[in-house]
Amino acid sequence: MPVSEIIDPASIVLDLPASNKAEVLDFLAELLYGNGVVSSKEIFKADVLLRESEGKTGIGGGVAIPHGKSEAVLRTCITVARLKDPVQWESVDGEPVALVILFAVRRDDKNDYFVKLMSQVARMLARERFCEALLAAESERELLDLFMENEERK
Amino acid sequence: MKNIVFTIKNEEGLHARPATDFCETAISFASAVTVHKEGESEIFDAKSLLSILCLGAVKGDTIRISAEGDDEEQALEALRSALEKT
């Protein structure tokens, strides 16, 4: 399935004011709960934090891709938050993070599906110009359009 | 240049902790290390986490890891153990 169909347009946030990673994840879990993507904010957040403890999700260049495979997730989706100011995050280049792409994944989804979805997003993010455009987008719509324009069509 | 092939056995595929361990192991050696799926032409840098995620190796995929440099043999051995641990 194309990445752009999995991004929840209602869960794209620009210039989120947050001073640390916990605030970012808390805000996004609340947003996903409000949008009916997760059935429990707390369970979902705990599963995201569990994953965070397993390895770095900051992929460098100010971008992080946290994810939670969780029984609380009702439909698999991707949410995007651009932060007002970068926050500390465990990242491969040690730099703070300004763009958070959070994957909410249903527990029943096959592992294959998730790894392939992640691979599609990673391939987009590997293009520096795509990341720069995401960081510069002026509206939620523009950000969503960037994902639609840049996904691989097979 | 030396290389090894490895079939992914881990249910989760090469992401999260296995991907991080793999990448950090590669970084700890001086040799240049690349990885690709057998039968596919796209080659990825094993020292970049994003690149490993792009590879998107799932359970059952056979990957070929290539290393080139003074410590190429040690690097491949360490990468094999990192994958076997997961």
Image (cartoon, rainbow, N blue to C red):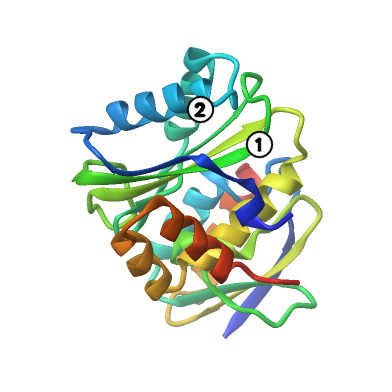
Identify the residue under disc 1: A76
**Chain bearing mark 1:** A
- Foreground pick, A124 / A48: A124
Q: Quadrant of residue A52?
A: top left
Q: Are there few (<14), some (14-19), or many (20+) residues within 10 Å of tag 2? A: many
The image position of residue B53, as x and y in percent, is 56, 58
Q: B65 left or right of A97? A: right
Q: Residue at x 42, y 60 (%)?
A: A142
Examine the rendered structure and indicate whether residue A72 appears above or below residue A16. Answer: above
The image position of residue A51, as x and y in percent, is 50, 32
The image position of residue B17, as x and y in percent, is 52, 42
The image position of residue B60, as x and y in percent, is 81, 54
- Foreground pick, B20 / B54: B54
- Measured in 3D between alpha carbons, the distance from the residue under mark 1 to the one under mark 2, in whole angstroms, is 11 Å
Name the mark on residue A32. Answer: 2
Task: Please name which of the two marks, 1 or 2, marks the residue nearer to the observer.
Answer: 2
Q: Residue at x 44, y 65 (%)?
A: B48
Element at label 2: helix
Q: Amino acid at mark 1?
A: Thr
Q: A84 left or right of A62? A: left
Examine the rendered structure and indicate whether residue B9 appears above or below residue A10. Answer: below
Q: Residue at x 32, y 32 (%)?
A: A24
Q: B59 left or right of B12? A: right
Q: Quadrant of residue B40?
A: bottom right
Look at the image and tell me in which quarter the N terminus of chain A lies: bottom right
Q: Amino acid at mark 2?
A: Leu
**Chain bearing mark 2:** A
Element at label 1: loop
